[in-house]
Amino acid sequence: MADSSNTQTQGSSRFGRYLIYTLLGLVCLYYLMPLFIMLSTSLKTLDDIRTGSLVSLPAHVTFQPWLDAWSKACIGVRCEGMSVYFWNSFRFVVPAVLISTLAGAFNGYVLTLWRFRGSDIFFSALMIGCFIPFQVILLPMARTLGELGIFNTISGLIFVHVVYGVSFTTLFFRNYYVTIPDELVKAARIDGAGFLRIFWRIILPISTPIVVVSIIWQFTQIWNDFLFGVVFSSGDHQPVTVALNNLVNTSTGVIGYNVDMAAAIIAALPTLFIYIVAGKYFVRGLTAGSVKG
Amino acid sequence: MGALSIRNVRKSYGTTEILKGINIEIEEGEFLILVGPSGCGKSTLLAMIAGLDNITSGEVYIGERKVNDLSPKDRDIAMVFQSYALYPNMTVRQNISFGLEIRKVPKAEQQKIVAQVAQILQMEQLLDRKPSQLSGGQRQRVAMGRAIARNPTLFLFDEPLSNLDAKLRVEMRTEIKLLHKRVGKTIVYVTHDQVEAMTLGDKIAVMKDGEVVQFGTPQQIYDNPVNLFVASFMGSPSMNFIPCRVAVLDGKFGLKMDTGGQTHVFPVEGASSALAAYAGREIIVGIRPEKITHKVDFLAGAPNFYVAETTIEISEPTGADTLLVITINDKNIVCRVHPDYAKSQGERMAFMFDMSKTVYFDPVTELRIL
């Protein structure tokens, strides 16, 4: 009797498994479709695009659209491609990610392991920063940047993104550090280590999972940002997302879908890369707090 | 002046008083145990000795120095924590030498100290491992090694064995005792385990609700508890408390014991004047399980030895002894009997009560009467 019920569950679980895999496969296809279309279109010639269908493979593979998008396509009046803006993005995204991550780590360290009177209130106040919509801070931020003399500069964009990102990174690090026993800090204090030394020598080295989470999150957010880029920078200082928009909108008679697609992929490439390289750390880091004793 | 002197130390958070005036003084090389149930303030007191927590009022002296306002690193102490608190990113070697490095001990000297410590604790082969690669007992040993490397005047242990399994705990207990003997330094050790307290301590401070209820040697505390709390806290299995009416018998006092139908009166020997005020009233009689055994013929009838026969309710063999539960005055009483003499559950057996170390408590104030 026990046996028969056993086989029954096995049979039905196998059927359920097929169902799940089929469903997952369909969902996968659905999500990969846009990428496939972008990739195949970017490798087609304009003639190919006109005559073939949207989902057909390129009849003749060409990399010319990619080269054009990188260094020749017209963005506004300049016809130098995406490369300038691509490096622009890197120049502010990398410092902004690093600074906001480090600041978040430091905030988290203070808020959990060196609690002070009112630290919980301080943390709650900081959390509100996560819920402030971009639009709300546009005008005050423009004013601030003007006062600081960094409007329409790379430093200005770094500043904006650090300020906006620090709420999120603080949240990440605080939640990670609450799982660290206080005794670790106490032991280090008795060993004679001070506030900063404990941070650099003990706390930061054990934060790898959450540092990765913070970097991925911040990199994606800042790289993909459009609004701050379009508002707080212009001309040569614009980030790649704004350049992509301008490239697509700059018409010279014929719409070069292949170049547009190539440019879009170029703009998305760094975030894709980060996810592929560090994705597993991302999941591990997000769940680290919950499984660690 | 002693090695550690705690004078009228108080601690309060807002209006709640955690410590209500603690006074303890111990000599150089003594092993002090702070023991008590959770929430009694023992860990807070230790943190204050360490300088990890501020003192609201009172004074703490380590040796000749008043340390109230010194930071932990300047107090010449080392501490071993319950969670071991090893630095997870460092190897055992780095864990031990971290404190030395901060105090700018030369590299060569550091290596020498690490080697010495590793030898004392027999963990040379573990030096290049990370804490995550060690077992609980090994981590505990590294934590002790880190403390020894500092060569402090005062060692502080905060429930260091509570995260270990029972067998390892006994082993490490012995090891700590050996270590104390070898290093000869003053130790303050916090625990909630009364067995650890009894086995390790030279002096024990039993704490409850932020106060030291009793301070003395383990034997003093075991034999002469000042109140019902200390009596019940120390000893395993714990002391039996029998509510008894004091009877007056030929000018002497006796205790009425009802063993299920049969009433015995056990005379109280010696200075019984303290009981005069309680004549005819109920008091609480404390008698340890090992003082109720099988009947030994040549002792039965001697002063302070009384025999009563009763039914065994429950029998719990532990191997070395068998714990038998009987009923006296409607209370379950545990007796510790040699297995060879123990009868089975439900059978009748003659028990011998050794009343020489019996203690008496007031049922209302719970303080010792005699």
Image: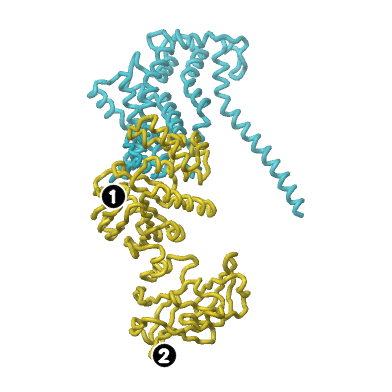
| Location of residue B259 in the rendering, given as x and y in whole percent from the top left corner | 52, 83
Quadrant placement of the C terminus of chain B: bottom left
- Nearest the viewer among B121 and A71 is B121
Q: Amino acid at mark 1?
A: Ile
10 Å crowding of disc 2: few (<14), some (14-19), many (20+): few
| Location of residue A160 in the rendering, given as x and y in whole percent from the top left corner | 32, 27
Residue located 54% across and 86% down the image:
B261
Q: Which chain is cyan?
A: A
State the residue lying farthest toward the bottom.
Answer: B250
- Nearest the viewer among B264 and A27 is B264
| Disc 1: host chain | B
Q: Which chain is yellow?
A: B
Marks 1 and 2, the one that precedes in the sequence:
1
Element type at marker 2? strand
| Viewer can see residue A264 | yes
Residue located 33% across and 50% down the image:
B47
Q: Amino acid at mark 2?
A: Leu
- Find residue B255 and report its image quarter: bottom left
| Viewer can see residue B22 | no
In the rendered view, tell whether residue B151 sits above or below residue A278.
below
> Mark on residue A263?
none
Q: Which residue is mark 1?
A: B62
Q: Which residue is mark 2?
A: B249
| Location of residue B256 in the rendering, given as x and y in whole percent from the top left corner | 46, 85
10 Å crowding of disc 1: few (<14), some (14-19), many (20+): many
- Find residue A29 and report its image quarter: top right
Element type at marker 1? strand
Residue A255 appears left or right of B71: right
